[in-house]
Image (tube, grey):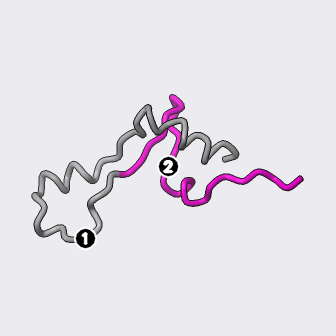
Amino acid sequence: MPKMKSNRSACKSFKRTASGKFKREKAYRSHILTSKSQKRKRHLRTSTTVSSQEEKKVARLLQHN
């Protein structure tokens, strides 16, 4: 039987924190930045945790990591 593999794109998008949650970057900060306020762009720079509804799905993608 072949080895189980983690989802490679998920590995690049999520990191596990020390408490076991998953950290992610925010969306909407790649282009058309001139129409967005400085405050909005500043808040988009910070990372956040994956919501509790999505945590089980992300854990399944990264189970062999």
Residue shown at the point (76%, 51%) measured from the top left:
4
Query: Which three-letter amino acid code belongs to the residue tagged 1?
Result: His
Helix, strand or loop for disc 2: loop
The percent position of residue 56, horizontal first and vertical second, equals 54, 36
Helix, strand or loop for disc 1: loop
Question: Residue 8, labelled with which disc?
Answer: none
Residue 17 belongs to the span the image colors magenta: yes
Q: Which residues are magenta?
A: 1-25
| 54 sits to left or right of 8 | left
Vertical arrangement, residue 32 with respect to residue 7, above or below: below
Which of the 4 quarters of the picture holds residue 49? Answer: top left
Query: Which three-letter amino acid code belongs to the residue tagged 2?
Result: Phe
The percent position of residue 24, horizontal first and vertical second, equals 42, 47
Disc 1: which residue: 31
Disc 2: which residue: 14
Residue shown at the point (25%, 70%) measured from the top left:
31
Residue at the far right: name it.
1
Cα distance between the residues tagged 2 and 1? 22 Å
The percent position of residue 16, horizontal first and vertical second, equals 53, 40
| 64 sits to left or right of 40 | right
Q: Are marks 2 and 1 in contact (CB under 8 Å)?
A: no
Vertical arrangement, residue 56 with respect to residue 46, above or below: above
Looking at the picture, tell me which residue is in the foreground, 51 or 48: 51
Residue shown at the point (32%, 56%) measured from the top left:
27
Vertical arrangement, residue 6 with respect to residue 18, above or below: below
